[in-house]
């Protein structure tokens, strides 16, 4: 970025490719709005296929659907929508936004314009069919890739496997995942993580352990993230012995303590009503200098909620809200209802008000809290005038 600014200050022009790179950097450093304004100020000759494509990439990366589609229309008019990259950016955005049905028509448009799909195009298409649970068309895509001479990579088969997993086609899922394992050695942690996830989803314990050994051979210095996926897989399998074994292995070798890994074992203990073991694990993490995060606290809160130990559940809920940034997390409707129903049954107006205050502090107060709080006031024996005063004092609109 600084090099480009220095180059321009010396009176030199940037090439079309440089302008495109500059736009992308501006978007990453200063935001899409800045990149957009810079694009609009470019001289006519610099607003070309490359810079249009760079701006489209900026929009797609930020899931700015309306702006991306408007720009695509302009690029169609200028005949700039002529490469797989243009369509791949759009399709990746649509998949990430949960709009898989819009992907196949774009691939059809590409083919009609004589633009050959590449591996990324096919991966997006497979991902869209995975979300649509369309096994038939996903298998057709794989066949088309082979006929077109497009080399399948690990994403091809894991996308296909995820469709089979969702449809309960276990044998086909295993076959697709084995294709990935049989590929030439690849150095992509994400591939191993997905294999661990999918094998555990179909209860293939041998597959999970096999992939783990392969992962350790490829990456001898095993990172926290690798252990996280392994522990999640073992938890999903219900392999409690393996879960404890590999957690202890991680604890004996970590360089940076990660509470998220502890949370996985805590969750396993709580599911089996092993509260003492879970508490001991949490205390051990604190002694190692780790702070329980919102996830840790909510796991204990849910445990006590389901045991109807509301005071303990409330203690953990309060601790969790103190760690939350405003608008970064909302309590589930089930959690809010369980607490409010409890306060109503106990005729505990003060408790209900304090709970609502906690929700308000993190901007998580539901719109219909008025009726529940009013019922609690009535149960506590308050008169209508008192109820109105209390609601007003708590900043809750009557009839909200």
Image (spheres, rainbow, N blue to C red):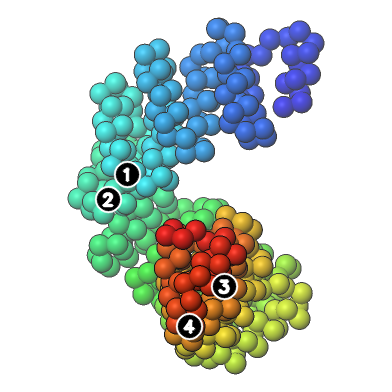
- Write down the residue under mark 2: 132
Pointer 4: residues within 10 angstroms few (<14), some, or many (20+)? Answer: few
Where does label 1 land, which residue? 100
Residue at the image position 33 percent from the left and 24 percent from the top: 115
Count neighbours of disc 3 (C-alpha within 10 A) and say few if under 14, some if 14 to 19, many if 20 or more: some
- Sequence-wise, which precedes: disc 4 or disc 2? 2
Q: Which is nearer the N-term, disc 2 or disc 1?
A: 1
Q: Do the residues labelled 2 and 1 touch (CB within 8 Å)?
A: yes
Mark 3 → mark 2, Cα distance in angstroms: 44 Å
**Residue at 28% across / 27% down in the picture?**
109
Task: Give the CA separation, mark 1 to mark 4.
Answer: 54 Å
Which of disc 2 and disc 3 is earlier in sequence?
2
Secondary structure beneath dot 2 equals helix
Percent x, y of residue 219: 61, 61
Q: Residue at x 62, y 20 (%)?
A: 38
Instruction: Please indicate whether residue 68 sits to the left or right of residue 131 in the image.
Output: right
Displayed quadrant of residue 278: bottom right
Q: What element carries label 4?
A: loop
User: Which residue lies under the disc numbered 4?
Assistant: 381
Q: Quadrant of residue 71?
A: top left
Tell me residue 291's x, y (percent). 71, 72
Who is closer to the viewer here, 120 or 80?
A: 80
**Observer-nearest of 380 and 273:** 380
Which residue is identified by label 3? 353
């Amino acid at each position: 970025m600084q090099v480009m600014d220095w180059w321009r200050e010396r009176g030199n022009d940037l090439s079309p490719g440089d302008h495109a790179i500059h736009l992308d950097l501006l978007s990453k450093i200063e935001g899409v709005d800045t990149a957009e304004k810079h694009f609009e100020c470019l001289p006519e000759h610099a607003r070309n296929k490359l810079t249009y494509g760079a701006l489209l990439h900026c929009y797609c990366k930020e899931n700015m659907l309306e702006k991306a589609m408007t720009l695509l229309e302009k690029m169609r008019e200028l005949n700039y929508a002529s490469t797989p990259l243009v369509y791949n950016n759009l399709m990746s955005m649509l998949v990430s936004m949960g709009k898989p049905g819009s992907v196949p028509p774009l691939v059809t448009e590409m083919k009609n314009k004589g633009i050959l799909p590449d591996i990324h195009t096919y991966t997006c298409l497979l991902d869209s069919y995975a979300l649509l649970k369309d096994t038939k068309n996903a298998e057709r895509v794989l066949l088309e890739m082979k006929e077109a001479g497009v080399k399948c990579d690990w994403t091809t088969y894991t996308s296909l496997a995820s469709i089979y997993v969702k449809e309960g086609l276990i044998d086909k899922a295993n076959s697709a995942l084995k294709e990935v394992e049989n590929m030439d050695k690849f150095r992509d942690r994400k591939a191993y993580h997905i294999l661990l996830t999918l094998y555990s989803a179909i209860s293939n314990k041998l597959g999970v352990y096999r992939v783990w050994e392969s992962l350790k051979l490829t990456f001898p210095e095993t990172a926290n993230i690798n252990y996280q996926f392994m522990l999640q897989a073992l938890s999903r399998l219900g392999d409690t012995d393996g879960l404890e074994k590999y957690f202890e292995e991680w604890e004996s070798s970590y360089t940076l303590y990660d509470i998220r890994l502890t949370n996985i074992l805590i969750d396993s203990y709580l599911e089996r009503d092993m509260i003492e073991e879970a508490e001991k694990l949490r205390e051990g993490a604190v002694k190692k200098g780790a702070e329980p995060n919102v996830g840790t606290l909510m796991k204990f809160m849910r445990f006590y909620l389901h045991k109807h130990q509301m005071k303990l559940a409330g203690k953990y809920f309060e601790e969790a809200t103190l760690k939350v940034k405003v608008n970064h997390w909302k309590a589930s409707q089930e959690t809010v209802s369980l607490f409010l129903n409890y306060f109503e049954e106990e005729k505990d107006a003060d408790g209900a008000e304090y709970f609502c205050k906690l929700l308000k502090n993190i901007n998580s107060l539901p719109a219909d809290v008025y009726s529940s709080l009013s019922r609690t006031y009535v149960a506590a024996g308050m008169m209508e005038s008192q109820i109105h005063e209390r609601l007003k004092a708590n900043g809750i609109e009557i009839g909200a």
